Image (cartoon, rainbow, N blue to C red):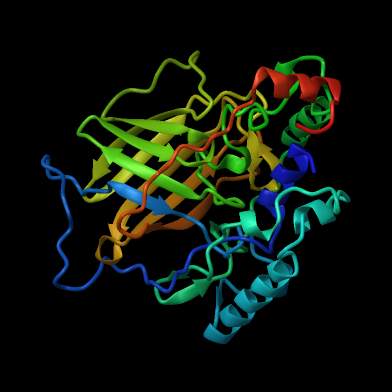
Amino acid sequence: MNFQSIVRATCGLVLLAAPAVVLAQGTGSKNWTMPRTPDGKPDLQGIWTNATFTPMERTPSVSTKPTLTEDEAKAYVKATQEYWKKYEGRADNPIADQFGSGGTGGYNSVYVDRGSDLAKVDGVYRSSLVIDPEDGKVPPISQEGRRRNSEMMRAFNKYDSAKDRPLGERCIVGFGSTSGPPMLPVLYNNNYQIVQTPDRILILVEMVHDARIVRMNDQHAPASVKQWLGDSVGHWEGDTLVVDTIGFSDEGVIGIPGGGRRTAASHLVERYRLVKNGQMLSVTSTWEDPSTYSKSHTYEFRYYRAPKGTEAREFDCNASDEERAKFLTGTPGR
């Protein structure tokens, strides 16, 4: 299975995604007090996961239902768990099967960490992470967006230089938009650590040890400055952290649902709010790029606080010179 297949699968499959989520969105019990940093801002620090069984887009079987009943949610979870169970003990996985490379080994169910339930928001189970448009689908990609994606996919088969290879393959950023932004759940390593100061907020991404740095109450960098993860500037609106990100590099970065690729026109606004007695982060991400999508769209996530004592450990992604040589020459094995 190649990287292109992984990207398509993690963004488009409707069978994967999410942690044990039986929590509603409310801020918490009446006796709960918002934890605050010394400067009086909500304390978002800690280790969080956004793993979820809830698919990014609404599936055909529930195309007209933004929410699921308790019985429907249980049936969905059971079917998903049984689907993955058949891969236990096999050097195989459904994504490899889908793209015709089954039997070649690779990630099996042991490596997959998608949680154990669907997300429950405001007391109901959501059928998709996309909440706007109302059909739970990412808007269609423009003709220009399809053209750019086609060019990138054709370039995927180039092996003339290490720089021709995808960023995830080179361990520069994680695949599937794990570091985003927006930060999307993928097959595994869906963990994040937040470290907070008055003028900087760090979001450490477990996958490929990416680090997002949000500059508080600052101006964006000049338009000529492009970054893998964009330029994120934040401010507080009451107890809600608002993060505005522009300035994306468009060098081979893909991972948004529908195959959208970040461009100079990409713009993301995220809103983070601590809820459920401090055990959950409510996160909405509104993505707009008129050069790629017909209109903006919004995802709503839930980040769940990791159990006490959980550590964020470095993800050892290392594309060594030896490995790069194998990529470029087609040398099999390690």
Residue at 37% over, 57% down:
306
Seen in the image, is 87 located left or right of residue 22?
right
Closest to the observer, 79 or 142: 79
Does residue 108 appear left or right of residue 56 in this picture?
right
Task: Answer with the quarter of the image where residue 313 lies.
Answer: top left
Q: Residue at x 65, y 36 (%)?
A: 254
Number of marks in the image?
0
**Eyeballing the image, is 217 above or below 190?**
above
Q: Quadrant of the C terminus?
A: top right
Q: Identify which residue is drawn at 68% across, 64% down.
A: 15
Q: Is residue 120 left or right of residue 172?
A: left
* Residue most extreme to the bottom: 71
* Residue at left offset 15%, top offset 44%: 37
Above or below, 175 against 11 in this view is: above
Position in image of residue 31 (x %, y %): 13, 71
> Is 137 situated above or below 329?
below
**Residue 323 drawn at (x, y percent):** 71, 24
Depth order, front residue of 31/240: 31
Where does the N terminus fall, quadrant-wise? top right
Image coordinates of residue 194 in percent, x first then y, are 33, 42
In the image, is 155 to the left or to the right of 20? right
Q: Is residue 101 above or below residue 210?
A: below
Q: Quadrant of residue 228?
A: top right
Closest to the observer, 228 or 133: 228
